[in-house]
Image (cartoon, rainbow, N blue to C red):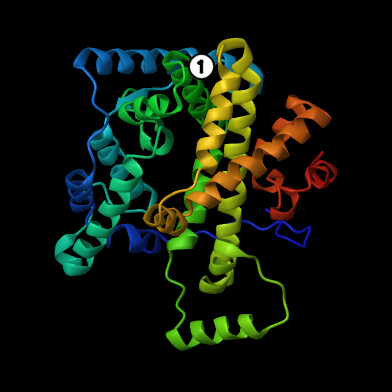
Amino acid sequence: MSMPGTDSKTEVEPVSEDTRLSIGSQIDWPLAALTAKRLVRPGPKTTAYTYEAAQAELGDAATRAEAPVREVTGLADGLRIPTTRILDRPGWIDAASDSMRSMLGADAAGTDVGSHGFAAKFGGVQAGGLLAFLSTAILGQYDPFTPDPETGEPGVLMVVTPNIINVERQLKVVPSDFRLWVCLHEVTHRVQFSANPWLRDYMQDNVAVLTSETGESTTEIVTRMTKALRGSEPREKGIIGAMQLLQSPEQFEAFQRMMVLGTLLEGHADHVMDAVGPAHVPSVARIRTAFDKRRKAPQNPVQRIIRALIGMDAKIAQYIRGKAFVDEVVETVGMDRFNTVWTSPDTMPLPDEIDTPQAWIRRVL
């Protein structure tokens, strides 16, 4: 993949299996899941009938969303429709802990707690706190790492029923419309990965770089950060600038690649939602307005701190910037030529091309 300011091709450096295991195997994942399920708040109050009806409708919506998403995107034509898991919050915690364990390279049994002792347990408690918070916020998620229980192939779509019920009540929108609208977004992610299997390995390779040991001593890290702070070279702002200081050059490049990929995936999904919505979701305009207002609503101080630490505000920016990129490219060249973006890492947008789509068009098309 070309890096900022160059036209050369840069491939993600392969990381040894031992290095891949270094982070994931230092976390007690069973403890993380157990901690999260003890901390998580219960979902909204519903009758058993209402809850079961919502589960059934979400399963149906995830299946119905597949055809219009494939039609608009031109992707995954002829492929089977993968599994959708309709989960509660504890179920999502179990699934997410398994996914994170796989993504970070831990073995199937989790972690060798005997080898890592207190450090693994401390990491498990920290991971559990994060999972507990996220389990109340995630509406749906495509997990490219967990195997489909029917085929054994990686990739499962997860929808979290209580969170969807909670948000549709807050927004006062038509439940059936909102459920299909959410599924359109998540099914787009499923289609992206189903049609382009290389994306999964690309993500995992970059995560391996991000979580690998750099070999830098504390003195070397401090020296590098001091030089960067005192230097005249421009630095990014916000969380990206912090990562630029804290990470090695190789890790920061991997971080940028992941940010660009996330921005593209989320922006493309939002573009597809808006393209499909008017024909399939009668109240889509009201849902979009209410949901965007919710995204921008002020949070209490604790929520703001947590959101900043885990990068949720940066993720919201990904939706906005990514959708603007996809909207302009599709309007200029059409969806078929836009799909060139899925060819390989070299056709991904460069970081500065996300905000200048015409530059990507000139370079790639």
Along the line of sight, which residue is nearer the eye, 8 or 162? 162
Location of residue 66 in the rendering, given as x and y in whole percent from the top left corner = 51, 17
Seen in the image, is 38 located left or right of residue 159? left
Against 16, residue 92 (above or below) is: above
Location of residue 108 in the rendering, given as x and y in whole percent from the top left corner = 25, 46
Q: Regarding mark 1 in the picture, which secondary structure is present there?
A: loop
Against 89, residue 261 (above or below) is: below
Residue at the limit of the structure toward the left, as seen here: 114
Query: Which quadrant of the figure contains the C terminus?
Result: top right
Along the line of sight, which residue is nearer the eye, 358 or 112? 358
> Does any portion of residue 81 appear in the rendered image?
no
Location of residue 113 in the rendering, given as x and y in whole percent from the top left corner = 17, 61
> Does any portion of residue 117 appear in the rendered image?
yes
- Residue shown at the point (57%, 21%) measured from the top left: 286
The image quarter in which residue 340 lies? top right
The image quarter in which residue 9 lies? bottom right
| Residue neighbourhood size for the residue with mark 1, other residues' Cα within 10 Å, grouped as few (<14), some (14–19), many (≥20) | many
The image quarter in which residue 176 lies? top left
Seen in the image, is 118 located left or right of residue 1? left
- Per the image, the residue denoted by label 1 is 65
Location of residue 164 in the rendering, given as x and y in whole percent from the top left corner = 38, 27
- Residue shown at the point (37%, 56%) measured from the top left: 302
Say how many tags the image has: 1
- Residue shown at the point (39%, 37%) measured from the top left: 138
Residue at the limit of the structure toward the right, as seen here: 362
Q: Amino acid at mark 1?
A: Ala
Seen in the image, is 62 located left or right of residue 247? left
